[in-house]
Image: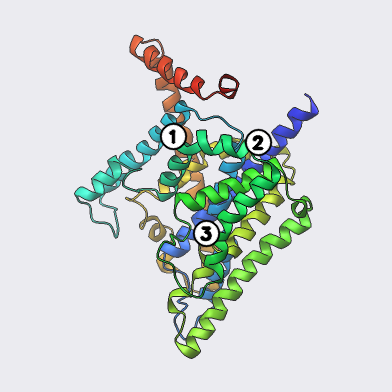
Amino acid sequence: MTQQVQEKNNRMANLEALRCLAMMMVIVLHYLGKGNLLGDVMAERMDACGVLAWCLEALCIVAVNVYMMISGYFLIASDFKVSRLIRLYLQLWFYSAVIGVVAALLGVVAQTPVDTHYYLTLLFPISMGHYWFLTAYVFLYLLLPFVGRAARGFTRAQYRLALGLLLGMFCIVKTVLPFRMEMDALGYDCIWYLCMFLTAGYIRKFGISFLEKKRNCALLYFGGCLGLLAELFALRMIYQKTGSFELLLKVSTEYNHLFPFLAAVGLFGLFLRVEVRGILRKAVLFCGPYTLGVYLLHENLGLRYTWQTWLGAGRIQGAASLFFHTVLAVLCVFVVGIALDALRAAVESGLGRMLSGRKVSRRITSVIEKGDKLFCSRKAE
């Protein structure tokens, strides 16, 4: 095996490890937030359990930004493929419709009316915003033929200026202004996904000298997390004394705030330089492709506010209990999600082989392959 191939495999193992970690962090965020475990920042007092919950939240808030960066790091050098878009939608539709309907039939849906809107959301997950992350991803992927090619053609100066303007408009301004802006989607939109996508693309194409040392990356990650907590509790203190900034109390915990952004860049840079070996390497390379299934399962509208109760969110007493139940929730949701998506992929592969010999299937496959070739870099160039 050549050195170039070895480096490629090591990098992929590193980022697959980060992908798994990021998904575990997402589970933490959803367990704490939707389990109503975060301390009330408007309350006069906050117990140790509430403080610990916010500390865990701060350490994990980078998860979504990191996941966006992983997508950007790979997609920036990839061609648009119709086949990839179709496979993604089929996976998304399976979880949305099948899991959502089963949850409704079993009567486990919580905090969500099981009505016409519920079933329309299951049937049209992208247009109805069932999973905001996937809606943003699909929109960005559709723009890949334009965005990807443009970014690959940028000089360093062009890329730096364009990315700086984007981050200045949608991150820096939001961070420094002491009021809410009407168009701020808190990072839950395709615009912020584009910002993170292009940030990762810049790192891949040109690199950032500060991120070349693991120590600097770790400092950036923990510094961003500490800055987030410091701003959160500083604004809380001001609110307690003056009654001001009520709408801004949690601003530092939003994805498009500067602190979560910097922390995500630091963690991403750290994993770019971490070598993954042995059984851990095998484990992350196996689990990595199925992590999206973990998200699609536990964030399904039918289970979104239910699984936290199943995993003890309502029975927590004290900081130690919170930590234990959070770790338990992460392990349970992650393992079940990986196993289910691996099963789904196996069934999908089997059905594909069964249908591959049919005339209609061959025609559809031929049309899709022609669509893929239209965006092939060698053909375009």
Percent coordinates x, y for residue 181 in the rendering? 44, 67
Residues at marks 1 and 3, CA–CA distance in whole angstroms: 28 Å
Residues at marks 1 and 2, CA–CA distance in whole angstroms: 24 Å
The 10 Å Cα crowd at callout 1, few under 14, some 14 to 19, many 20 or more, is: some
Position of residue 102 relative to residue 379, above or below, is below
Amino acid bearing label 3: Phe
Position of residue 349 relative to residue 152, above or below, is above
Q: Which residue is mark 2?
A: 282
Position of residue 23 relative to residue 41, above or below, is above
The 10 Å Cα crowd at callout 3, few under 14, some 14 to 19, many 20 or more, is: many
Q: Tag on residue 170?
A: 3
Q: Is residue 333 left or right of residue 101?
A: right
**Label total for image:** 3
Position of residue 39 relative to residue 86, above or below, is below
In the image, 281 versus 371, the foreground residue is 371
Which is nearer the N-term, disc 2 or disc 3? 3
**To which quarter of the image does residue 109 belong?**
bottom left
**To which quarter of the image does residue 150 belong?**
top right
What residue sits 28% from the left and 40% below the top? 123
* Secondary structure beneath label 3: helix
The answer to the question of whether label 1 and label 3 lie on touching residues, with beta carbons closer than 8 A, is: no
**To which quarter of the image does residue 98 belong?**
top left
Q: Is residue 353 left or right of residue 217?
A: left
Amino acid bearing label 1: Leu
